[in-house]
Image: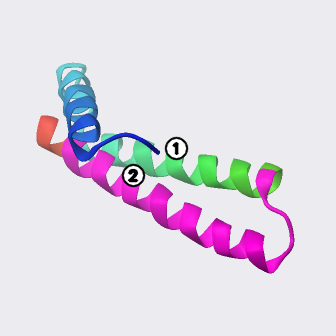
Amino acid sequence: MQKTEDDIEDRFRTIGSRRAVEGVGRHQFVWALMLTRDHLWRFLEQECFADNIVALHGEQELRRMLNQFFDRAIYYGILGI
C-alpha cells in the first residue's frame, strides 16, 4: 500500500531480469503474476469481506488497487526481461 511507483518499478524490473536469466518467457512471467493476483483475491474474498454495503465499497476499492499494482508489476517486469 505504501510502495511508490519507483519502488514497484525497481522491484519488478529486477525480478523480470532474474526470470529472463533463468529462461522464463514473458508469457510465463505474466501468467504467474496473473495467477498470483487471482489466488490472492480469492483468499481475500474468503477470509476478509463482510456482507454489507460498506464492505462492498471497500472490496471494490481493494480490487482496483490490487489490479493497479499487478498491472504495474507486469509492465515493469516485462521491461526487465
Q: Which residues are magenta?
A: 48-77
Taking the magenta stretch, the answer to whether it contains residue 62 is: yes
> Where residue 69 sits in the image (x, y, percent)?
39, 52
Query: Measuring 32% from the left and 40% from the top, which residue is drawn there?
Result: 29
Residue 81 visible in rendering? no
Seen in the picture, residue 68 relative to 19 is either above or below; the reply is below
User: Does residue 41 appear left or right of residue 19 in this picture?
Assistant: right
Which residue is the extreme one toward the bottom?
A: 53
Residue 41, magenta (yes or no): no
Asked which quadrant contains residue 62, the reply is bottom right
Spatial CA distance of label 2 from label 1 is 9 Å
- Foreground of the two, 73 or 5: 5
Q: Secondary structure at mark 2?
A: helix
Q: Determine which of the numbered discs, if any, sits on residue 49 in the image.
A: none
Q: Position of residue 64 (x, y in %)?
A: 48, 67
Residue shown at 13%/43% (left/top)?
Answer: 79
- Quarter holding the C terminus? top left
For disc 2, the neighbor class at 10 Å (few under 14, some 14 to 19, many from 20) is some
- Mark nearer the viewer, 2 or 1: 2
Q: Earlier in the sequence, mark 2 or mark 1?
A: 1
At horizontal 23% and vertical 21% (from top left) the residue drawn is 18
Q: Determine whether, in the image, residue 56 is placed left or right of residue 25.
A: right
Which mark, residue 36? Answer: 1
Q: Amino acid at mark 2?
A: Phe
Visible in this render: residue 64? Answer: yes
Quickly name the residue at label 2.
70
Count of numbered marks: 2
